[in-house]
Amino acid sequence: MLPSYLMLDLETTGGNPVVDRITEIAAVRIEAGREVARWSSLVNPGTRIPALISSLTGISDAMVADAPRFEQVASKLLALLDGAVLVAHNARFDHGFLKNEFGRIDIALRSKLLCTVRLSRKLYPQHRGHGLDAIMLRHGLQTQARHRAMGDVDLVLAWLRSASSELGPDKLAQAAQELLGASNSLPPHLESAIAGIPDSVGVYLFYGDGPQALYVGKSVHLRGRVLSHFQSDHKAGRGMRLAQETRRIETRPTAGEFGALLLEARLVKTLQPVYNRLLRREASLCTWRLADAPAARPLLSLVQADTLKAQEMAGLYGVYRSRRQALLALRALADEHALCPMVLGIEPSSGRCFAHQLGRCRGACCAEESAGRHRLRVLQALAAQRLQAWPFAGRVGLREHDAASGRSELHVFDQWCHLATVSDEAELDEALADRQPLAFDLDTYRLLCKQLPKSTSTRGALLHLGGARLLER
């Protein structure tokens, strides 16, 4: 198949290469089609083996108690790897564990990598299953040591002999060389072609076996960003799991980075991907409303964001993801600026507040500070968090154009709400005719606050749509 390669298999304490450890290694070195070395060893992982793993592999804590640690067998493994291609079934799994184990003893593992799952897919594209169990069934192979390292190594070698006999050694060698020339960091089960992903700005979606999206992300270089997920997955358990579960990749190019940010935020809220933690839809967003009357008690009241009208935003301060977060932020401001927590409404109203007794309140609760002066200091303390009023008389469009692709998009907004992204006159007419209730979204508000100054200073990027029907290209 290859001039020189090392067929390898590992057994481990789990599937996370960052926290789990190797319990067994088996390796057979092949040169010019002949076996020249065979070695296997149990490895003491330095941690307990979970019962589920032990029942699968048959390797128990007692079996590895007197086994060498990885650092004691590392030199033997490096000698076997010298000048050879590392070959394994689902090679990224084994490679991730080896990189982490060698990294713990300050050795950088550098070797070419060939995955026999990907090789099976390339040689037998008509079949869906390419795991070892599926290969055993398809080729009539047998083993008495499934899920033991040397047993699985011998099983893959037997499959290679079967494939060579069935398809011819030249076809096997050609397929192996083609895979070596391609990206070895891609998972073997990935059905989407990375080469077909544009290296432009846009949004990408990862899918598993079902219709539920696993992850949504954005990038100004889609292909490179997608590849980075699979090139660094051995560094973090979450990245490894995402890479292992991803089967399909969908991309949606946009005309610019702002459009990609908007689309990413909308898709995350709509699809609720399991691996996205940020940008999720918030059901309990809230903000502080400051009373107009200085003597009002409480001076601040908490308002749920889903009940807001965009026209009221000028009198609101901060947007918080929970009532607890809002109260903690307000208490911190009260402490920093010596504001009265009782007047603010975060402490029961009865006599002097506790902060005044500690010298941390200037006495608005007991008339030592006037209500008007206290409200003025509250305004000053909250100034940086004041929500902006919508600065336009009606709807506006923010234009983006990608010169390389010729793609143009217009993002339509009203009262800080994203109404639509359109690419032609018909879509713009439909968006302007839509009279659905506006829904405030914190992420859109923040994105737009950052983008508006840029668009205002860029000629032709900001269009006022109060009756206008135009989409510049």
Image (cartoon, grey):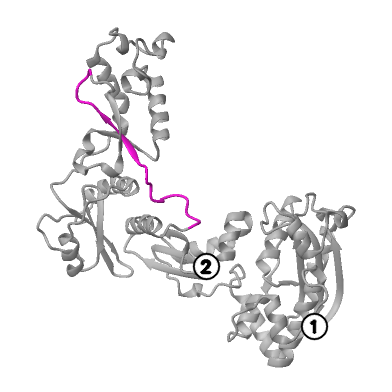
Q: Is disc 1 surrounded by few (<14), some (14 to 19) or many (20+) residues within 10 Å?
A: few
The structure residue drawn at horizontal position 66% and vertical position 89%, both measured from the top left corner, is 171
Question: On the image, numbered disc 1 is attached to which residue?
Answer: 32
> Image quadrant for the N terminus?
bottom right
Q: Give the extent of the magenta segment.
A: 274-295
Q: Residues within 10 Å of mark 2 (few under 14, many from 20)?
A: some
Q: Is residue 289 magenta?
A: yes
Give the camera-side residue of 38 and 264.
264
The residue that disc 2 covers is 208
* Residue type marked 1: Ala
Left or right side of 12 for 227: left
Residue 21 vertical position relative to residue 124 in the rendered view, above or below = above
Q: Is residue 104 magenta?
A: no
Q: Nearer the viewer, mark 2 or mark 1?
A: 2
Q: Secondary structure at mark 2?
A: loop
Q: Earlier in the sequence, mark 2 or mark 1?
A: 1
Q: Is residue 134 above or below residue 385?
A: below
Q: Nearer the viewer, residue 358 or 122?
A: 358
From the top left corner, tell me how far across and down residue 245 is, in percent: 57, 65
Question: On the rendered structure, is 127 left or right of 436?
Answer: right
Q: Secondary structure at mark 1?
A: loop
Q: Can residue 244 be seen at all in this image of the molecule?
A: yes
Residue 132 lies in quadrant: bottom right
Q: Is residue 24 left or right of residue 382?
A: right
Looking at the rendered structure, which numbered label has been put on residue 149? none
- What kind of residue is marked 2? Gly
Q: Position of residue 224 (x, y in %)?
A: 49, 64
Give coordinates of residue 400: x percent, y percent: 27, 60
Does residue 406 sit above or below 371 in this rendering? below
